[in-house]
Image (cartoon, rainbow, N blue to C red):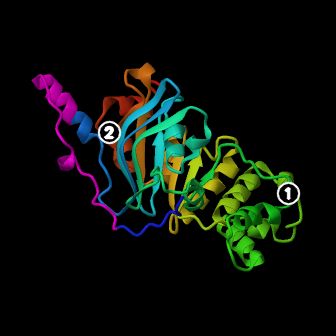
Amino acid sequence: MRQLHITDLQRPVLTVSDMPEAPLSSEATVSQAKHAVDAIRNPQEESVFQLNDVGVWYGTKHAISEINMSIPLNRVTALIGPSGCGKSTLLRCMNRMNDLIPGARVEGAVEYRGADIYANDIDPVEVRRRIGMVFQKPNPFPKSIYENVAFGAKVNGIRGNMDEICERALRQAALWDEVKNDLKKSGLALSGGQQQRLCIARALAVQPEVILMDEPCSALDPIATLKIEDLIRELVQTYTIIIVTHNMQQAARVSDYTAFMLAQEHGVNARLIEYGPTTEIFTNPREKRTEDYITGRFG
């Protein structure tokens, strides 16, 4: 199984005019289809991911379907929508974490810098090194702060001065000044917010290019949440970040682009409803369902 080497030129961003027109049976259907296509406003800038007709099955359950979107470089993209609409499932598609779930199957193409990460000859371990992940609940190892950060770097064969690698990662995670004199202290002894930043530092030590965050603030208090949000805005200068959140205010504060998803109980088969710049999604959504969710009418 070969390593993931990204050398292809980035494909052009998919635009509305590039999308094939499906056969339509009536003027009403034409209008609805055009409205649905118009609601997907892909970023007109360099992209890191291109998702083409992505669907996921868990056994016989069709979790998400027909996801088409591009995700831009060095931007924060937020995935929002009611519980069960496939946000976390879609997030896990982007670093092959769904491979670890028995019975999971991914359809379509998930292209990272032009390479299909689900190709048979791509090493999923290398995919996860380039595309790191931070989970909903802080999950530090029962090791020292230093060993928590160094663990991933050692496992992935990152070479260099481990002291410098750990310090760099902790500084990037805005945690160094708080723990630099207690690096031998257990990571489990830190506060919840510090533990989450430690997990972010652990991901950064592997030197990824993309960071996936699955509701990283849901278990934190408002002060710790604000620190994580500030950190996200700093990290996006260097990394591409994709975040799942139920907090509408958080999505509005930290993201550059927002994707809204819905599930079967809301009349669709777990798919992308609207995607575009966050300011437009929150102030001038093109889909009434998006407006209803953002304003709290359902979800």
The residue shown at (65%, 68%) is 172
Whole-number angstrom distance, CA of label 2 to CA of label 1: 46 Å
Q: Report the residue marked by disc 2.
A: 285
**Which amino acid, by three-letter code, is at mark 1?**
Lys
**Which amino acid, by three-letter code, is at mark 2?**
Pro
Query: Residue 158, image x and y in percent?
Result: 67, 71
Query: Residue 279, image x and y in percent?
Result: 37, 49
Other-residue count near label 2 (Cα within 10 Å), few / some / many at <14 / 14–19 / ≥20: many
The residue shown at (77%, 52%) is 140
Judged from the image, the secondary structure of the residue bearing numbered disc 1 is loop
Residue 240 in view of the camera: yes
Residue 250 in view of the camera: no
Q: Report the residue marked by disc 1.
A: 143
Please give the label number shown on residue 192: none
- Which image quarter is the N terminus in? bottom right
Q: What is the span of residues highlighted in magenta in the rendered image?
A: 9-34
On the picture, is 120 further left or further right than 102?
left
Label whose residue precedes the other's in the sequence (2 or 1): 1
The residue shown at (70%, 44%) is 220
Residue 25 sits inside the magenta stretch:
yes
On the picture, is 263 further left or further right than 157?
left
